[in-house]
Image (cartoon, rainbow, N blue to C red):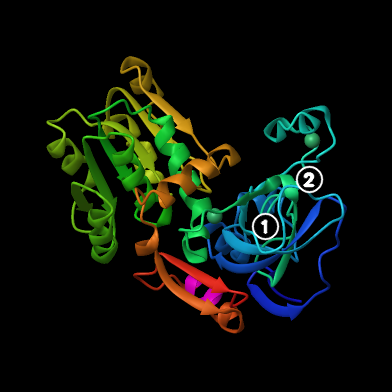
Amino acid sequence: MKSIYIEKPGTVRLAEIPDPPMEPRDVHVRVRYCGICGTDLGILSGDMGFVRSGLIRYPARIGHEWSGIVERVGPAVTMVRPGDRVIGDNSISCGECEHCRRGDYLKCTHRRGSVGTIRCWPGAFAEYMRMPEWHLHVLPDNISMEEAALTEPCTIAYNAVLMCRITGGETVLVLGTGAIGLAAVTIAKVFGAGKVIAVGRQEGKLAIAERMGADVVINSVKEDVLPAVLRETDGKGADCAVECSGAIGFVGQASELIAGKGIFALAGFYETTLDRFPIDDFVVKAQTLCGTIGHPGVLDAVVRLISERKLDVKPLITGVVPMEKGVEAFYEAAAGSSGRIKTLIEFNRE
Ligand SMILES: [Zn+2]
Ligand SMILES: [Zn+2]
């Protein structure tokens, strides 16, 4: 089969590799689409904490935002069958420890790695991938395979919004207008946010933020964000914020961007540290700063939102390219040309 992988920092390759092996409870999945994520571009550049710490090694079989169709199943598989349209969890559990035997895979003590990232389980930029049956989720009929490939980044947004503990009517600040930030705008509204303020650098993406439900948009290239947020919140700051931009400057201003008792959820990677951080401001204002990361427990919740048409992920798909043009698409995404949100690579036509 063919796979697109990072051979070494700076080099993407499309090459023939052996088919994945099959264990009795493994499922051989024919990949339909896989999206290019900022994490993939970090692995391509090599300039990334997980690379420096040795958690990601080369060659790296990346790809964790995927959808596919069950091609064949191992002899012990009972949960899916050929033809099922599926997506999968990111973190692969052992299937054998006491937690896994109870079906509590999140607590697995012998994780085998994350799909396409940390301690890399061979990822989905390939014609086929191998997944243990218990990590697959069968999709409802009314979700397209393109939409399904967007589920994973939306789980990051969903978790970040969950951390904000929205009860109704809050002003939510969303920093960043990539796929995660844009999804967070809609999800915050679904959770009952009163006013969503979206901050980004590109007019085109801010227009999509408005389509996704943002009440106010702030272009951080044209305007200083902190005074604009204070203006929009009667000088108090937002009730909560979801930081999806990866811009460390916003983290430094976190205590001012949110109100007293506010929550500031970090859903980006920053690859740097802050020298001067006003910790005591958080104490005095009883604010919360929290990190959040993808969590397999919410995959089905996101699928439901898309299926019920409460979350429209189609505006996030700004390009679909065939596998043969995938390497090019990677270098283009790494060069960061404007307007792109999510590029999907199509590995099989049906
Ligand atoms: Zn991702
Ligand atoms: Zn386990």
> Which kind of residue does numbered mark 2 sit on?
Arg
Q: Residue at x 71, y 62 (%)?
A: 82
Q: Is residue 266 visible?
A: no
How many residues crowd mark 1 within 10 Å: few (<14), some (14–19), many (20+)?
many
Q: Which residues are magenta?
A: 329-334
Q: Is mark 1 within 8 Å of ligand 1?
A: no
Q: Report crowding for label 2: few under 14, some 14 to 19, many 20 or more residues within 10 A (C-alpha).
A: some
Residue 166 is left or right of residue 222, and the answer is right
Name the residue at 77% across, 40% down: 111
Tell me the amino acid under the disc marked 1.
Answer: Gly
Residue name at image x 26 percent, y 66 percent: 204
Is 217 above or below relative to 229?
A: below
Q: Secondary structure at mark 2?
A: loop
**Residue 257 covered by magenta stretch:** no
Q: Please give the count of numbered marks on the rendered protein.
A: 2
- Position of residue 169 measured from the top left corner of the image (x, y, whole percent): 22, 29
Q: Residue sitting at 62 percent across and 75 percent down?
A: 347
Quadrant of ligand 2: it is top right
Q: Which mark is residue 57?
A: none
Quadrant the C terminus occupies: bottom right
Is the residue 21 above or below the residue 325 in the image?
above
> Dot 1 corresponds to which residue?
116
Assign the magenta stretch its main secondary structure: helix
Q: Residue 141's spot in the image, x, y percent?
A: 50, 58
User: Residue 342 location, x and y as percent?
Assistant: 45, 65
Residue occupied by mark 2: 112
